[in-house]
Image (cartoon, grey):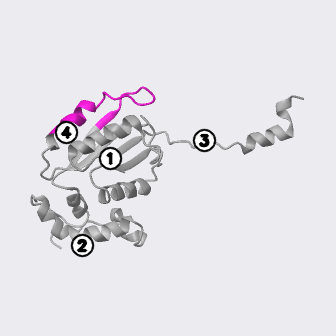
Amino acid sequence: MGKDNQAKHRHAAQLVRKMGQRASYDRILIVTEGSKTEPLYLGEIRSKFRLNTANVAVQPSQFGTTPLQVVEYAEYLFLNGDEYREIPKKGFEQVYVVFDRDDHETYHNALAKAAERNGKLRNDLKQAVKFEAIASVPCFELWLLLHFEDVQAPLHRTDVYQPCAGICRTTTRAMRGTMPKRAKIWQMPLKEPGT
């Protein structure tokens, strides 16, 4: 009878903690300009579709809110990781940066820098990483407004804030889980045109 087949060894093997396993889809890092609305919104989408937090990480930029700072933070976070936020070093197949067009002077530079990084960075598996900018024009709040109202006219970002103010407060509360689940934004129908 082998030593490893003894009851105490079989029992010890069963008590060994198993490592968490990530799902088979790509690991995605999303870095946002905003520190509240965008991370909450994207976090709720992750929850809604039951995407594993080991596969999809959403983080606000720690370098600032200009588009170029968001891109630079995303690259920094990808290359160096963040143990406190449980972001592994080079642990993603896709990196997305989310920022507003607004009136930022670094907007075009940020788009160019993100395009330069696309396919150039390598992850921990030595694979090329998709690195893309997602610009909300004119601003992210318009995206939230479109969940509730049919807006077909071009709007400047300052025109979006007025109608969006109440909706954003309600949506932010819903995204924090303080409202009933039926009030979550992806379950609310778009307002029919002309109603």
Q: Amino acid at mark 3?
A: Met
| Residue 118 sits inside the magenta stretch | yes
Q: Amino acid at mark 2?
A: Gly
Residue at position x 51%, y 42% from top?
Answer: 22
Residue at position x 74%, y 43% from top?
Answer: 14
> Pointer 2: what residue?
166
- Whether the residues at callouts 1 and 4 have beta carbons within 8 Å, the answer is no
Left or right: 68 with respect to 25?
Answer: left
| Label whose residue precedes the other's in the sequence (3 or 4) | 3
> Pointer 3: what residue?
19
Distance from Cα at disc 2 to Cα at disc 3 = 44 Å
* Residue 124 placement (x, y as % from top left): 45, 30
Left or right: 68 with respect to 174?
Answer: left
Q: Is residue 174 visible?
A: yes
Q: Amino acid at mark 1?
A: Val
Q: Residue furthest right?
A: 1
| Label whose residue precedes the other's in the sequence (1 or 4) | 1
Instruction: Pick the residue in front: 151 or 42.
Output: 42
Q: Which residues are magenta?
A: 109-131
How crowded is the residue under tag 3: few (<14 C-alpha within 10 Å), some, or many (20+)? few
Q: Which mark is residue 111?
A: 4
- Whether the residues at callouts 1 and 3 have beta carbons within 8 Å, the answer is no
* Residue 87 placement (x, y as % from top left): 44, 43
How crowded is the residue under tag 2: few (<14 C-alpha within 10 Å), some, or many (20+)? few
| Label whose residue precedes the other's in the sequence (1 or 3) | 3
